[in-house]
Amino acid sequence: LEHAAKIKGQAQEFFQQVHSDLSIKKSSELSDLLEWSALLHEVGLNISLQAFHRHSAYILRHTYMPGFNREQQRVLAMLVRFQRKSLKLNEMEEFSLYKKKHIIGLIRVLRLAILVNGQRNDDPLPPLSLTVDGDKWTLTSGESDWLEHSKLLHADLLTEQEYWHNAGWELDF
């Protein structure tokens, strides 16, 4: 639960930095769904480590969840489904209450929040800034050598950059 809370905090922080670029209100139903997806993104680990993001999506889609309507559950499922690995956006569902561009923006925020906390250690992250310019997203830190101190994070960001490139997006850091 501690890890999920860190992901939620990081996702909130990134969302606050880019919400206006995504045309999503700072306090909105979508921001709430982002927070819930951050808290629940690993629920599928109870089934298997392999493809846990798909298991998480299945659980969130098919579990009775008081307080969420069916479409909100489908959004949660999509967010956690696309939290890692390749971005097979052709598998993304259509929604009637939400715009696809908003869901895609939340997917990007969640992926980055999970990625920068992927090492699961107690070492604090340097202050990170996320900016959006069209399809180009840039992750920076006030510490110029922030990636030199974390080679694993740098490698993970390079892999993520390739996933984004294959989806037609751009990630810079």
Image: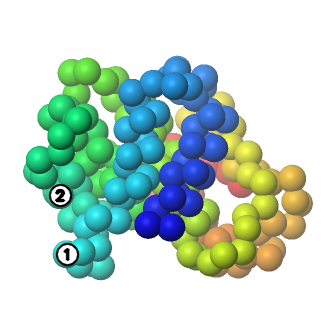
Percent x, y for residue 169? 51, 43
* For residue 51, side relative to residue 16 (left or right): left
* For residue 162, side relative to residue 74 (left or right): right
| Local SS, label 1 | loop
Identify which residue is drawn at 37% across, 49% down.
Answer: 37
> Is 44 rendered above or below residue 24?
below
Label 1, on which residue?
Answer: 47
Percent x, y for residue 97? 25, 21
Label 2, on which residue?
Answer: 59
Identify which residue is drawn at 25% across, 61% down.
Answer: 56
Identify which residue is drawn at 63% across, 34% down.
Answer: 16
Q: Nearer the viewer, residue 65 or 24?
A: 65
Identify which residue is drawn at 46% across, 62% down.
Answer: 4
Q: Quadrant of the N terminus?
A: bottom left
* Distance in Å between CA atoms under marks 2 and 1: 10 Å
- Could you tell me the amino acid type at mark 2? Ile
Q: Nearer the viewer, residue 172 or 152?
A: 152
Q: Residues within 10 Å of mark 2 (few under 14, many from 20)?
A: some
Q: Quadrant of residue 13?
A: top right
Please state the total of marks drawn on the protein image.
Answer: 2
* For residue 24, side relative to residue 16 (left or right): left
In the current view of this chain or complex, which residue is farthest to the front? 66
- Could you tell me the amino acid type at mark 1? Ile
Percent x, y for residue 43? 29, 64
Q: Quadrant of the C terminus?
A: bottom right
Percent x, y for residue 72? 25, 34
| Residue 164 is at least partly visible in this image | no
Q: Quadrant of residue 147?
A: bottom right
Q: Answer yes or no: do the residues labelled 2 and 1 have beta carbons within 8 Å? A: yes
| Residue 169 is at least partly visible in this image | yes
